[in-house]
């Protein structure tokens, strides 16, 4: 993917490197038109730097489709910022279309192929007039369902746009449009499109891989070569822009920062966030150039000498910039990427061990060695003179530090250090971890589970046991320790009851002979799912999608948290799953009564299975017969 605005080259103190200006134009500023492919072509003639080039897996698939000379049309779908226009422009170039013609403002463009066919391009369906839309959709239908081989359509549209246009056209024609349902099924089920319609859904692109490619393209861009000999780096001075670029490059931490921000974005995706390429570019630009004292929160080279002179380099920390801390809150939260990352609470969440190290480590003999290795070793963004001075003032209890406003400065610095700690603490560091510094403390286990299932492996027994224990505590409302079987419990009548001591049935924690719990990977969503079969040969077991937030909920409940204290939404989801299991158990019991009952007298007794909790915390099902008094 290529985005190229033009800037004039400059060098020396007080003038800006053209590449840095170029990168800044992608940042989260109010007028970052460079993020829109529609403005790229016009800037190509003025460009003095190489474009940011990203390899798009979907583009390679489209090119392979074109090379096959298959008949039919192409639909490029996605949300705003996914790169639909870029893909359209790339196909146009691949088929021999001229850049000048593409820059023409007309909404519909045509190019004649070498085999005589005509390709009609619509880079944005929403730009068409009703008459143009009807004619284009007629060509789409003829080329897909009819015998039209001389012409075909290449159209880019949001999911809702194409479906709405097809629906409205069908209503006006007094019929159900024959393409609407197949296209809708393709969007929802990743399949089912007609043979002569190639659908490429850009919204299904993986976030972690896309972000990694963006960060690599930015960090390795040839424009950084213009920074050689820059006065801002003379005499061991630290240029915050170049420092952030080097940290993004990952040469000193073996790519740890890029890997962890990629993991965070992947968890966000699995939680339902869709972050298009446009947001990834804005995030990368902000991480490198962010500074709260710069205009619009983004530095240029001319800002660096002033920042150095004021000793404000430490406030350019890319660890803060990753969460938009350099931006006004309203502007940061207007971007989906920063809203998604804010949900992790990185900087606000912490552990006693991590805060103890950051606050007392400089003076505590037991912690000094670890403090020097994890904090003082980073003189730019770690234990800086500014941080140590604020820490000393806070600990010594100076009058200003005791005031609420005085403590706020140190607490803000502490929040910054927590973010840095999340990205820099080594894996396997004794006593310290990075995921416990977030709202998703078990996200590491979740990602490991996804990786195992993706590779055809089985979930670890520790993870399975924790999930079963959490499920049992939600199902029963009791603090039971069972992790080898699943209790499907009720209160005797109300399936949504939060305390249920009647065990309707049990299921093994691991699928055995077709019965019990199984954890699988849903091929459509790429998320894990819990399937529970209450009987052998059950064709449609009860299924529960296991998103990261639901996984976190069950793990925290298993560790002792009260279900309602973490997320009422997750609790309601779990109770709905419990109701589904109870309904399946009821249907199973009715079927067995019809098949297996022997004729005999009814003595009026009722058998109930109560869940008793032993001193060890294990729950046991105890059968009790109840007979109504005559």
Image: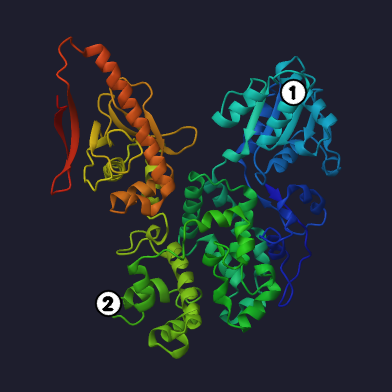
Q: Residue furthest front?
A: 630
Looking at the figure, which quarter contains the C terminus?
A: top left
Crowding at label 1, few (<14), some or many (≥20) Cα neighbours within 10 Å? few
Asked if one can make out residue 140 in the rendered structure from this viewpoint, the answer is no
Indicate which label's residue lies in the foreground, 2 or 1.
1
**How was the colour assigned to the protein in this rendering?**
rainbow
Residue that badge 1 annotates: 171
- Left or right of residue 295, residue 186 in this image: left
Q: Secondary structure at mark 1?
A: helix
Residue that badge 2 annotates: 366
Q: Secondary structure at mark 2?
A: loop
Q: Position of residue 66 (x, y in %)?
A: 69, 28
- Residue 580, by quadrant, is top left
**Nearest the eye: 281 or 531:** 531
Picture layout, residue 285 above or below residue 124: below
- Left or right of residue 57, residue 358 in this image: left
- Left or right of residue 174, residue 412 in this image: left
Asked if one can make out residue 181 in the rendered structure from this viewpoint, the answer is yes
């Amino acid at each position: 993917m290529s985005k190229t605005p033009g800037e004039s080259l400059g060098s020396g103190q007080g003038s800006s490197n053209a590449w840095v200006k170029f990168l800044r134009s992608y940042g989260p500023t109010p007028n970052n038109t460079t993020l829109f492919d529609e403005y790229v072509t016009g800037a190509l003639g003025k460009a003095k730097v190489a474009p940011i080039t990203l390899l798009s897996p979907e583009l390679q698939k489209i090119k392979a489709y074109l090379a096959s000379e298959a008949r039919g049309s192409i639909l490029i779908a996605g949300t705003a910022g996914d790169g639909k226009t870029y893909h359209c422009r790339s196909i146009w170039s691949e088929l021999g279309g001229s850049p000048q013609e593409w820059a023409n403002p007309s909404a519909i463009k045509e190019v004649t192929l070498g085999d005589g066919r005509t390709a009609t391009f619509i880079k944005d369906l929403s730009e068409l007039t009703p008459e143009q839309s009807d004619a284009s959709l007629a060509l789409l239908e003829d080329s897909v369902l009819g015998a039209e081989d001389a012409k075909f359509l290449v159209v880019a549209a949001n999911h809702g746009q194409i479906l709405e246009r097809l629906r409205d056209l069908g209503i006006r024609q007094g019929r159900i449009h024959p393409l609407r349902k197949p296209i809708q099924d393709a969007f929802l089920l990743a399949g089912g499109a007609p043979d002569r319609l190639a659908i490429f859904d850009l919204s299904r692109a993986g976030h972690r891989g896309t972000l990694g490619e963006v960060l690599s393209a930015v960090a390795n861009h040839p424009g950084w070569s213009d920074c050689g000999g820059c006065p801002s780096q003379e005499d061991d001075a630290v240029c915050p822009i170049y420092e952030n670029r080097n940290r993004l490059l990952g040469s000193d931490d073996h790519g740890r920062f890029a890997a962890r921000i990629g993991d965070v974005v992947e968890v966000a995706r699995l939680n339902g966030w869709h972050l298009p390429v446009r947001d990834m570019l804005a995030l990368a630009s902000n991480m490198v150039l962010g500074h709260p004292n710069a205009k619009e929160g983004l530095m240029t080279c001319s800002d660096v000498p002033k920042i150095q002179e004021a000793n404000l380099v430490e406030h350019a920390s890319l660890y803060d910039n990753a969460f938009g801390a350099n931006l006004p809150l309203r502007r940061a939260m207007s971007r989906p990427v920063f809203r998604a990352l804010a949900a992790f609470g990185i900087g606000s969440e912490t552990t006693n061990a991590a805060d103890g190290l950051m606050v007392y480590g400089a003076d505590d003999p037991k912690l000094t060695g670890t403090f020097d290795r994890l904090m003082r070793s980073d003189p730019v963004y770690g234990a800086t003179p500014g941080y140590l001075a604020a820490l000393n003032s806070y600990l010594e209890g100076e009058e200003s530090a005791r005031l609420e406003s005085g403590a706020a400065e140190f607490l803000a610095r502490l929040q910054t250090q927590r973010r840095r700690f999340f990205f820099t603490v080594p894996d396997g560091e004794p006593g310290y971890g990075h995921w416990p510094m977030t709202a998703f403390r078990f996200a590491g286990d979740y990602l490991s589970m996804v990786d195992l299932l993706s590779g055809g492996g089985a979930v670890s027994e520790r993870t399975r046991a924790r999930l079963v224990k959490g499920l049992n505590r939600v199902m029963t409302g009791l603090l039971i320790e069972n992790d080898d079987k699943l209790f499907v419990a009720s209160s005797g009548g109300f399936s949504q009851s939060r305390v249920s001591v009647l065990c309707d049935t049990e299921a093994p924690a691991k699928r055995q002979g077709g019965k019990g719990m199984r954890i699988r990977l849903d091929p459509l969503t790429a998320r894990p799912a819990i399937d529970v079969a209450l009987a052998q040969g059950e064709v449609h077991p009860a299924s529960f999608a296991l998103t990261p937030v639901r996984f976190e909920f069950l793990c925290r409940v298993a560790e002792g948290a009260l279900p309602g204290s973490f997320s009422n939404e997750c609790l309601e989801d779990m109770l709905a799953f419990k109701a589904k299991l109870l309904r399946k158990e009821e249907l199973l019991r009715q079927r067995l009564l019809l098949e297996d009952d022997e004729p005999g007298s009814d003595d009026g007794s009722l058998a109930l299975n109560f869940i008793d909790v032993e001193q060890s915390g294990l729950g046991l099902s105890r059968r009790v017969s109840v007979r109504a008094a005559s």
